[in-house]
Image (tube, helix red, strand yellow):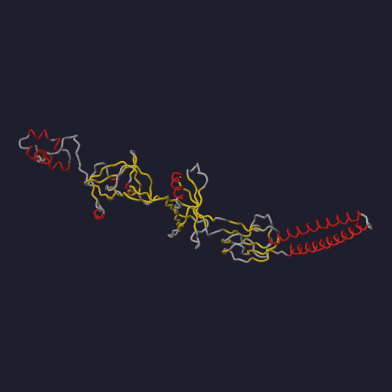
Amino acid sequence: MGKKSVTLLIVAAAAAGGAIYWPSAIEERFPGWVERTASIRALMPGAAANVPKKEASQPAQGRPVVVQRPPAPVDVDTVQRGPMPLRVDAVGSVQPIATVSIKTRVDAQIDKIFVADGAIVKTGDVLVKLDSRQIEAQIKQTEASIAKDQTVVEQTTRDIARAQELVSKGSGPQLNLDNAKTAQAAAKATLLGDQALLDNQKVQLTWYTLTSPLNGRVGAFAAKAGNIVRAGDNTVTGILATIVQTAPIYVSFSVPQAVLAPLREAIERGEGDVMATPQGSTRAVKGKIAVLDNTIDPSTGTITIRAIFDNTDDALWPGQLCNVRVTLKTEPDIVSIPRTATQSGQIGNYVYLVENNVARLRKVKVGRFQDGRDIITEGLQGGETVVSDGALLLADGSRVDIRNKVQAKKEGI
């Protein structure tokens, strides 16, 4: 055997002895070495003594290791109990109480427009004057016919008087008197017909002056002075402009049929205040419920409501969308929690209560959602400490670390 072989044999023996007598050095590179070589060390004198204490204390293979989880960081809040208004929130649209389309009833040319586009008008204000020369001439012609008819009536009256005088003296026949009376009746009938024609023409004359039938705001005129407008034309040349009533004004919205009963009770008490905030604005306008629809929509289970607003300052504009809040009444004893505290799962709605820094699961029943809070009808009494943030990290019995301790201390938690 050569020197090189002897040297390799000595190195191998030293490595084997080190692996047996100092197993912790090998365990760092080859996990499980201590356990696999335990039977060999038991036969070697002094080898078992070099096993590290931490290795000797390792749990037996297959036994579960229990790890204590750290406390979960959470925010808490106090379950509130007390009076709370019963409110209903909805999205509504502003609708004018009345809308009138200004149209011509005759074929004529526009002579003059007296108001500007978009102007505010009152009842009776003149909007448009049409060319009325033709109808005015017809009226004068009819007035002349009436004057002629009156002279004929006067003439027949005189004829009757003369015929009666002659008949009374026996100098004239009865036939002349009867003919005179017939002529007078015909003249009076002609006079009445011409007077009726004059009245009709005078009515038609009013059609050439278009006035506002209500207080409101006029839109843009579709035709200007000089244009020809025609009766019965539904195009832009037929509808000259549209007037909408803006003060007062409606806001129409729908609410669930479940609030119909308290809604009607509020109306009977003279309550039912409505606050409408136009979208894009922070200003709220106060109004009252004016109209309840006569049917409930079976497809949506909602009922349409119209609230009326004075709108003297044009805060609401026709067609505008609004966030609507209806206050029906104030309930005296309501339990509520932040919306973020309510969790949902297979068991339904539940919350986590904090007792001695331990989370306890509690099933609850939610009545409704209002102003960022859930109204609890079952499961809580008020005054409990509930987890408002961080509940996703919890299980029943989990330890918690309250993050908002300063706020919790102020609230007496």
Q: Position of residue 86 (x, y in %)?
A: 39, 50
Figure quadrant of residue 239: bottom right
State the residue at coordinates (48%, 52%).
289
Residue 11 vs 92, above or below: the answer is above
Q: Position of residue 258 (x, y in %)?
A: 44, 44
Outermost right residue: 171
Q: Position of residue 266 (x, y in %)?
A: 44, 50
Figure quadrant of residue 63: top left
Residue 48 vs 273, above or below: the answer is above
Total numbered circles: 0
Horizontal arrangement in the rendering, residue 311 relative to residue 236 (left or right): left
Residue 120 vs 46, above or below: the answer is below
Visible in this render: residue 14?
A: no
State the residue at coordinates (43%, 47%).
262
User: Camera-side residue: 90 or 7?
Assistant: 90
Outermost left residue: 45
Q: Position of residue 174 (x, y in %)?
A: 91, 54
Image quadrant in which the N terminus is located: top left
Horizontal arrangement in the rendering, residue 12 relative to residue 393 (left or right): left
User: Camera-side residue: 28 or 188?
Assistant: 188
Visible in this render: residue 243?
A: yes
Horizontal arrangement in the rendering, residue 220 relative to residue 260 (left or right): right
